[in-house]
């Protein structure tokens, strides 16, 4: 099923990535191309192409972020990421490629938003979810950008032919994100048309995290609560560490906790690239060998050392292998594919939003909105916690956390800890630490490093600074 889906998507991308997606269409005008539902669907599928590449949202992007997390480090050419003193030229080039891919997808989204409603053979009802999907993806990308670069040029369907655009303020970027996400919420379908496509529940989940980031606790809580109350999702049951393969394994098509994933298949250019494990004589977690650009240490890293061995996630994600950094070094095997055909050919999907995210968003927002934890917030946290230890997520268990043990501060600390373990190697930890205002503190506590201010944001790449005449050197982020 995964291969069939990817072949269909590939065919659509080949059609939609032709000259018609140039900013100045040549052989075929946009007015002609967007006349039918099939043509509009091909166009919206083109948004995913740059997002799914090695420089997109689900490969190089999380690899850069994972080197910043408190629970691990980067090695090799990515070592400067974990030194926290600013990026070197190699990694500046990498984040520049991420920027370029993001704006390619934004451009493709803008073309859909602008042209699909004018299709002569598309009804308003047919156009609405297609435009909603484009707005969801545009919001998702700008949300990633504003958290890593701060204010960025806002390219929309109204100005997409203008090369010279100033940096928008952070507030203005968030205003567009919320506008797009709210419109997506109202137009996307209740059920995904196929795996990997967003729904209104994915839009609500995005909104919950955006509101959480903006400190709007009530709206963050309410959006997460709507997803929970829908009954559309549930945590996949596990009883052993290997059961987590039912969530992350390369053969998995979809699960009960998938809210929005990037889909991959075992073919070069359409497979997941993993930077955190390798094949050895003893371990065969990745067919072509692996890269292992990130690692951790089970003794010197307190996050890992203090992680209970009874938590099944620990055995599923980490494995001990000496890669020349000592006998306690560990690699990450969350996305394992022993028969991957190439470095870029693993079949694992990348989880952008899972039901576990929704529950943890809700637990935090509920507690913050109420000035402290209550039974509702605790239950959302306990569901994730129970499953981690192999218990039924919906039934009281011996590992349940007790409300009387927590106040407003310590409960949030517990949610943050749980989310760190639950979403390990999903590219979320550093952004959570930044959102909470504790990134520098955590890195100092765990790694003993003082984080330079310039390391808190990525530099705007030369591809923008040199050719966008609305920018000056003063627009560059601190230290670059």
Image (tube, helix red, strand yellow):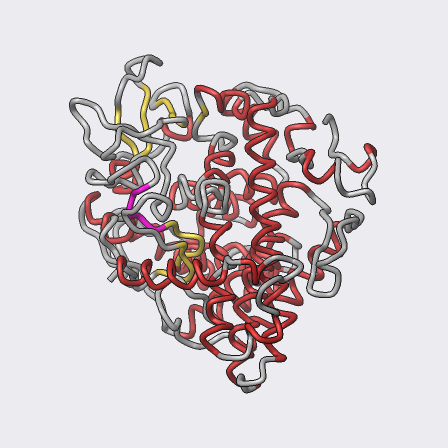
Q: Is residue 371 visible?
A: no
Q: Residue at x 56, y 66 (%)?
A: 134
Magenta-drawn stretch contains 118? no
Quadrant that contains the C terminus: top right
Which span of residues is magenta-colored?
Answer: 345-349
In this view, the residue in front, 133 or 143, is 133
Q: Residue at x 29, y 49 (%)?
A: 248
Q: Quadrant of residue 372?
A: bottom right
Q: Where residue 245 sits: x, y (%)?
A: 23, 48
Q: Is residue 291 left or right of residue 106?
A: left
Q: Is residue 450 left or right of residue 62?
A: right
Q: Is residue 5 visible?
A: yes
Rendered view: 390 above or below 235: above
Q: Quadrant of residue 14?
A: bottom left
Magenta-drawn stretch contains 347? yes
Q: Where residue 124 sits: x, y (%)?
A: 57, 85
Q: Is residue 72 left or right of residue 131?
A: left
Rendered view: 48 above or below 122: above
Q: Residue at x 56, y 77 (%)?
A: 186
Rendered view: 84 above or below 10: above
């Amino acid at each position: 099923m995964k291969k069939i889906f990817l072949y269909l998507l590939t065919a659509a991308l080949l059609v939609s990535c032709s000259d018609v997606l140039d900013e100045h269409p040549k052989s075929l005008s946009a007015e002609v191309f967007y006349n039918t539902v099939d043509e509009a669907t091909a166009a919206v599928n083109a948004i995913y192409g740059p997002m799914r590449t090695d420089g997109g949202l689900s490969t190089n992007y999380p690899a850069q972020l994972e080197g910043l997390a408190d629970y691990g480090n980067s090695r090799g050419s990515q070592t400067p990421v974990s030194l926290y003193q600013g990026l070197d030229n190699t990694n500046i080039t990498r984040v520049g490629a991420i920027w370029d891919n993001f704006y390619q997808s934004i451009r493709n989204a803008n073309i859909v938003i602008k042209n699909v409603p004018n299709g002569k053979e598309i009804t308003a009802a047919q156009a609405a979810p297609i435009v909603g999907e484009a707005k969801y993806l545009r919001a998702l990308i700008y949300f990633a950008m504003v958290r890593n670069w701060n204010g960025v040029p806002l390219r929309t369907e109204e100005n997409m032919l203008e090369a010279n655009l100033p940096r928008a303020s952070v507030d203005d970027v968030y205003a567009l994100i919320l506008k797009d996400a709210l419109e997506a919420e109202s137009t996307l379908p209740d059920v995904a048309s196929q795996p990997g496509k967003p729904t209104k529940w994915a839009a609500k989940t995005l909104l919950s995290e955006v509101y959480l980031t903006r400190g709007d606790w009530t709206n963050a809580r309410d959006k997460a609560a709507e997803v929970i109350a829908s009954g559309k999702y549930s945590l996949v049951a596990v009883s052993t560490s290997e059961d987590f393969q039912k969530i992350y394994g390369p053969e998995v098509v979809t699960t009960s906790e998938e809210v929005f994933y990037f889909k991959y298949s075992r073919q070069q250019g359409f497979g997941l690239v993993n930077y955190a494990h390798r094949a050895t004589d003893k371990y065969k977690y990745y067919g072509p060998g692996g890269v292992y650009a990130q690692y951790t240490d089970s003794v010197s890293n307190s996050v890992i050392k203090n992680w209970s061995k009874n938590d099944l996630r620990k055995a599923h994600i980490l494995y001990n292998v000496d890669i020349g950094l000592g006998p306690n070094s560990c690699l990450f095997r969350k996305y394992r594919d022993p028969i991957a055909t190439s470095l870029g050919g693993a079949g694992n999907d990348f989880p952008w939003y899972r039901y576990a995210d929704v529950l943890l968003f809700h637990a935090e927002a509920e507690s913050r909105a109420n000035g402290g934890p209550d039974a509702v917030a605790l239950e959302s946290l306990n569901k994730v916690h129970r499953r981690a230890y192999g218990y039924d997520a919906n039934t009281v268990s011996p590992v349940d956390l007790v409300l009387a043990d927590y106040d407003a501060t310590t409960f949030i600390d517990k949610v943050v800890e749980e989310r760190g373990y639950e979403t390990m190697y999903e590219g979320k930890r550093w952004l959570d630490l930044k959102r909470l205002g504790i990134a520098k503190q955590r890195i100092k506590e765990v790694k003993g490093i003082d984080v330079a201010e310039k390391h808190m944001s990525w530099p705007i790449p030369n591809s923008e600074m040199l050719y966008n005449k609305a920018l000056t050197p003063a627009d560059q982020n601190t230290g670059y």
